[in-house]
Amino acid sequence: MQTDIADTIVALSSAVGTGARAIVRLSGPEALALAGSVFTAPQALQPGQRRAYEGAVSVPGIAASLPTDLYCFPAPRTYTGQEVVELHVQACPPLVELLIAELLRRGARAALPGEFTLRAFLAGKLDLPRAEAVLGVIEANGRQELRQALQQLAGGMTAPLVGLRDDLLNLLADLEAGLDFTEEDIHFIAPEELLKQLAKGLAQLTLLQKQLDQRSLSGRPFRVVIAGPPNVGKSSLFNALTGGSALVAPEQGTTRDYLVQRLDLDGTALDIVDTAGWQSADETIEEQAQHLGRAAAENADLILLCQVAGELPPAPPTAQEVLPIATKCDLATPTDDGLATSTHTGAGLDELRSALAIRARAHAQPPLAPSLSRCRSHVAACLEHLRRGHEMVLFEEPPELLAVEVRGALDQLGELVGAVYTDDLLDRIFSRFCIGK
């Protein structure tokens, strides 16, 4: 990714589409000047001040000015380390496109994918694992993935390595200083201290390796919970998807417990869970069934929220992702509020299986997987260098060879955190971002 950080870049940084507000972000030395060329406010813009302005922007082709809030963030205390300006306007896609086009005409450059975060990395605001964690936060498919990405973004992976890198740098300095006095038999660090420092590094890296391995393992298959009011066809849908034998009857409350069935869709495993219908409980058994159903929904990665075709689905009780399902479409005309299905005719079931397979595959390949793979590779290589160095001290091999191994370990740590990098590596990482991030 060959970019010039002296350019002032612009992009839409909020979600694409209509909404209350859209955020057009600029970063670079001319960010405020370019934004000020289309923005007017009662008071003059003050360079170097962190503040907000209420005003309007004028866009060619639009007769009326657009009410706009301008937020100015002077360098270097910004995400990118450069001057950053945000224009908050009404989220009307044609108007936003015209505004960005006008800023481009006035001298800004369209931001490349991930270029804002790339500039944050180049400015030293983020190390490489934390920059990768930004993408993990954006693309997290569930609470667990979001939690892991936020931990990595907070420095949970690289913070423990800062002290290790300092220790190895000091160790290498002592070794190389001693190389100048080999004939005088002067040692700047005793073998016992060498073994202690190398053993400490091995322990830290072994712990980090275990943590990376645990993060890379999926704790369980993608979990789909079928939920909704009683007698809307949840158990029939469960049987149709899994080939199971959940009890089906026209009476409400037939399902008291929840059933789990493993399903394989195009080589991707997921669990389908059938739960009791949501209703008020008037007996102890029914109350327990409701409690189990709600608990299953809270642990779901996706909820299939069922309602009979033509009726509005109830509000989901949890914050999990919800896919509305219209059931019994052979008996009534469905609305646009859900995927239309019928277990009697099979309508919509193939589309539902495809939707589940897409979500399950995304769950199986978490956004942080490339970052974890890259970090595991560097940690393993660093461990190997330190193990060889530890053996060299034990067998009293020449200090020149030990210095080579310590230097190799430092190079691996440098590549892990981004202190050493190539343009190809940055291009591979940041090209996966969306534009505006």
Image: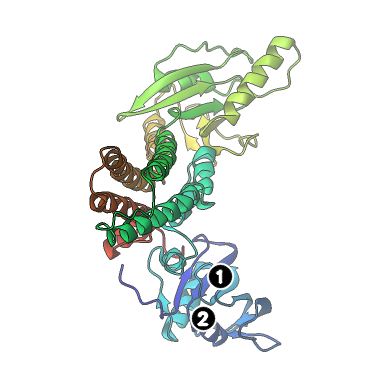
Residue 11 image position (x, y, % from top left): 46, 70
Q: Which residue is mark 2?
A: 31
Quadrant in which residue 53 is drawn:
bottom right
267 and 282: which is toward the camera: 267
Q: Which residue is mark 1?
A: 78
Image quadrant containing the N terminus: bottom left
Quadrant in which residue 240 is drawn:
top left
Q: Is residue 302 left or right of residue 105?
A: right
User: Residue at left 42%, top 38%?
Assistant: 203
223 and 5: which is toward the camera: 5
Q: Is residue 89 left or right of residue 153?
A: right
Question: In this rendering, which labeled residue sits more in front, label 1 or label 2?
Answer: 1
User: Residue at left 53%, top 62%?
Assistant: 14
Q: Earlier in the sequence, mark 1 or mark 2?
A: 2
Q: Amino acid type of disc 1?
A: Thr
Residue 265 image position (x, y, % from top left): 34, 28
Which residue sits furthest right? 282
Residue 273 image position (x, y, % from top left): 51, 22
User: Residue at left 60%, top 71%?
Assistant: 88
Identify the element where label 1 is drawn: loop
Q: Amino acid type of disc 2?
A: Ala
User: Residue at left 57%, top 37%?
Assistant: 320
Identify the element where label 2 is drawn: helix
Crowdedness near tag 1: few (<14), some (14–19) or many (≥20) residues, C-alpha within 10 Å: some
Quadrant in which residue 430 is drawn:
bottom left
Which residue sits furthest front? 184
Give the CA distance from mark 1 to mark 2. 13 Å
Crowdedness near tag 2: few (<14), some (14–19) or many (≥20) residues, C-alpha within 10 Å: many
* Res. 417 visible in picture: no
258 above or below 355? above
* Res. 32 visible in picture: yes
